Image: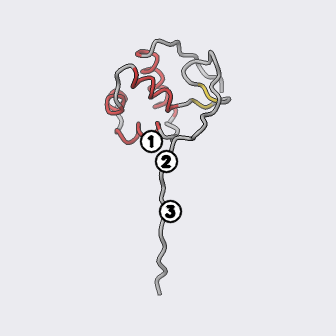
Amino acid sequence: MRTAFTLPNLRIKRPEEPAPVLVGAGPALVGRHRRDWFRILAELQGAGFSNAEVARALHLSDTTVRNWKYGIEPLHSKGEALLDLHAKHVKRRRRRMRW
């Protein structure tokens, strides 16, 4: 006898209340060691980039970039590349994070 089951509706939503952003900590440093990737991508969008153009510049899929925007952490190397792109096109200094 087979038991039927259903998966819950898995929707990724932006949190209602964003975590505090540290002032003067470079592009969107949240908390102690986390970046606000949503804000970084939004600032790139404000500079004229679409998600597809960011994906093309980083040699990634559109889905990967969209996932970052909705809370998935990028791999370290891809996050570094995104921060470099952000620093180049959004007029802000980039600071290294201390691990």
At mark 3, the secondary structure is loop
Please name the residue that numbered disc 1 is placed on: 67
Q: How crowded is mark 2: few (under 14 residues within 10 Å), some or many (20 or more)?
A: few
- In the foreground, 43 or 98: 43
Q: Nearer the viewer, mark 1 or mark 3?
A: 3
Tell me which residue sits at (49%, 36%) in the image.
74
Front in this rendered view, residue 10 or 81: 10
Residue 86 percent coordinates (x, y)? 45, 20
The secondary structure type at the circle numbered 1 is helix
Given the current orientation, which residue lies at the most extreme bottom position?
1
Q: Which mark is residue 12?
A: 2
Disc 3 marks which amino acid? Pro
Q: Are circles 1 and 3 on residues that touch, CB within 8 Å?
A: no
Residue closest to the far right: 32
Query: Going by the picture, which residue comes out furthest to the front?
Result: 16
Q: Residue 8 carries which label?
A: 3
